[in-house]
Amino acid sequence: MADVDPSPAMTGDDRIVSVEHLTMRFGGLIAINDVSFQARRGQITALIGPNGAGKTTVFNCVTGFYKPTEGMITLRQKGGREFLLERMPDFKIAAKAKVARTFQNIRLFGGMTVLENLLVAQHNTLMIASGMSVLGLLGFPSFRRAEDEAIEKARLWLEEIHLLDRADDPAADLPYGAQRRLEIARAMCTNPELLCLDEPAAGLNPRESAALNELLLRIRNHYRTSVLLIEHDMSVVMGISDHVVVLEYGIKIADGTAGEVRDDPKVIAAYLGVEDEEVELVETDLEKLERRG
Amino acid sequence: MAPVDAAVETSPEGAQIEDEQRIAAAPGEIAPPPPEQTKLARGLRQGVLAGAVSLAMFAPLIGLQTTENIDNQLILKTRWPLLIIIVIVVAIGRFAMIVFFAPWLAQRRLQVVAVPPVSRWTTMKRYFVPIAIALLVAYPPIVLGLSGIQGSLKWVDNFGIQILIYVMLAWGLNVVVGFAGLLDLGYVAFYAVGAYSYSLLATHFGLSFWVLLPLAGLFSASWGIILGFPVLRLRGDYLAIVTLAFGEIIRLILVNWREVTNGGFGITSIPKVTFFGIPFNGSDQGFASLFGLPPSSAYYKIFLYYLILALAMFTAVVTTRLRRLPIGRAWESLREDEIACRSLGINTTNTKLTAFAIGAMFGGFAGSFFAARQGFVSPESFTFLESALIIAIVVLGGMGSMVGIAIAATVMIGGIEILRELTFLKSIFGPNFEPTQYRMLLFGLAMVGVMLWRPRGFVGTRKPTVFLGRQKNVSADMAREGHG
């Protein structure tokens, strides 16, 4: 995959994140092998692939939760500042480079209220406003103003995700779909340049996943935030993504618009495998092998 | 591709749901509600079984006793009547538990679910804090009026000051354990650092308490950071072990560094606190003669009471305010989910260190007060048992709740002190009965009881730090206890 698609559209300044020759090894296991792709500003880029293809590993490398074995991940902010993400600790990627993320298994602060969850997301801004807690402890009005602003912002996002009436309930009390939406809103409260969503539609019913599509489009169009998305739900991927990257066994097998990727024979083979009879043949072979070994 | 994927995704889930429904329906069909007859039979059976088990267990423990006779020979004595009484008590207790107590408990639980929370209780809770503070302020005059100057000494010193020291310590530890969810079993080390800072600097350099109080807090806070750094990566059991070891290290240094700490003998004649420069003694410049009062040591104790009350209130105000600040929310979110915290750009290292430092600082304040009050410190005051006691208060109080912790400290420390007062028990159990010897037994029983009935401590709710509409308490069942 060394030869990255050099089409002129992709080399301009509108790249928000470029992943180059990314490799991640866990001991002897190569989770991702020399993957390169780019995500453009103001677009929704989807990362798809069968289970175990290495999508979440790529995600964890971009958000700093894993340190890649090899490769370079560059993030360009609106002002032109560049960050080499593979060199930064995870919390600095969120705080300085402005990359926010959600998790495959929702990680809300269950014992805190919905509103508190959204305020924790604004921790760094509020921390400065509270003078590293000193001014806040003395009750300075400047801190109270900053906190009111933070609450106002949280209220805005609660309206966006239709949870305003649940603001004072503990987050663990929310239904599953609402928890997913809250996690996205919490990530958005950090003012991200790039929003990374790890399977946001997992476990949602068709109506909820349609609402999710709407929310993601609104994040892209209204809030001008670029989105990097892992998803299994094809109605979400095909419905809203501008650009799709397909991984299989840690290698990029396709890269293009939703339409292009859909018709790619490699992708079809990766997802649907080969014909059913052939699969059965392989399975019986495997069983024989197991019995022997 | 989409429909195929959807079918694959949903079909196993659907099957699982059907399975679950079948399982849920099954027990209702098979097992009818147990009639009175079977309950009685079950009670009898269980009673006999419990009797047999206790017989097997207690026969060697209670039935047989080895003592020495007059010639220093080991002889075996038997206590069969006592054994039989205990076995019968156990059997009857088990029977009563199954036949009467368990159904009553189940019924009561149903009633609790049905009845909505009573509003009278919530209004009482709203005024609880101001009433409690007013009572605490009025406590010394009340005691003085009831039992005279000399009689009040015991109540102000042994009860008031002793309890308030532990309230303050537990509130300090609450920052680390209750808010940030980091289990610290060596908290007493910071208490010791504060006490020894005051003792050494006051005896060697003659510095006043009011200068050394903030210094002791500062020293303890820096030790909190020193401890914090190596344990940042540890969680849960490992963190507990390292903090436990830290507490022991500090104690062993105090024992063995004889040139400085005077070893196990401790430091004696530590200067007293002055009333802003006026000493508490019998001289002409002393407090009593200056204010024209009859000489008594009670004034000093009452002054110390108000001092520790002020320190404890300071701790309460600072920690409750910190909880509502971004740093406090970060502590609590750290307890809930550390990985999510990092994904939101929170520097978890600094957040943990501030929790350790602030918790340690209050321990240091309490320590310097302790040294000034005792006039004597030795390593024996800073054993692991003290740490365990403070942790127990925090856990019994529940979930970072200030009021719950204050109640727990009053019950535990006050309970231990009150055992000394129960002299009438000697007329029942004989002159050799010493109620204080049973304090650990009662302490353990109380812990087991509270943890059975109120597993989340006395106050099992968490008050949100901000709210849009109406502030609703969050049940502690939602919150995590912290992994580290």
Image: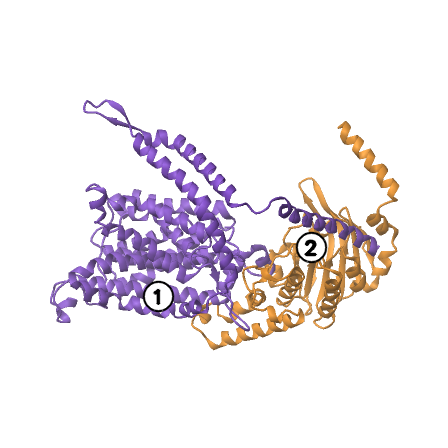
Chain colours: A orange, B purple
* Image quadrant where residue B317 sits: bottom left
Q: Secondary structure at mark 2?
A: helix
Q: Distance from label 1 to label 2 (Cα)?
A: 48 Å
Check the image and report above or below for A193 versus A203: below
Q: Nearer the viewer, residue B125 or B20?
A: B20
**Marks 1 and 2: CB-CB under 8 Å?**
no
Q: Secondary structure at mark 1?
A: helix
Asked if residue B431 shows in the view, the reply is yes
Residue B353 numbered mark, or none? none
The picture places residue A68, in percent across and down from the top left corner, at 67, 50
The picture places residue B243, in percent across and down from the top left corner, at 43, 47
The answer to whether residue B317 is left or right of residue B182 is left
Give me the residue at 43% from left, 33% from top: B53
Question: From the image, which quarter does the N terminus of chain B lie in?
Answer: bottom right
Provide the residue designation for mark 2: A59
Check the image and report above or below for B286 versus B422: below
Query: Mark 1 belongs to which subunit?
Result: B
Q: Nearer the viewer, residue A61 or B3?
A: B3
Q: How many marks?
A: 2
Check the image and report above or below for B102 versus B466: above
The answer to whether residue A55 is left or right of residue B242 is right
Provide the residue designation for mark 1: B313
The answer to whether residue A22 is left or right of residue B244 is right
Q: Are marks 1 and 2 on the same chain?
A: no
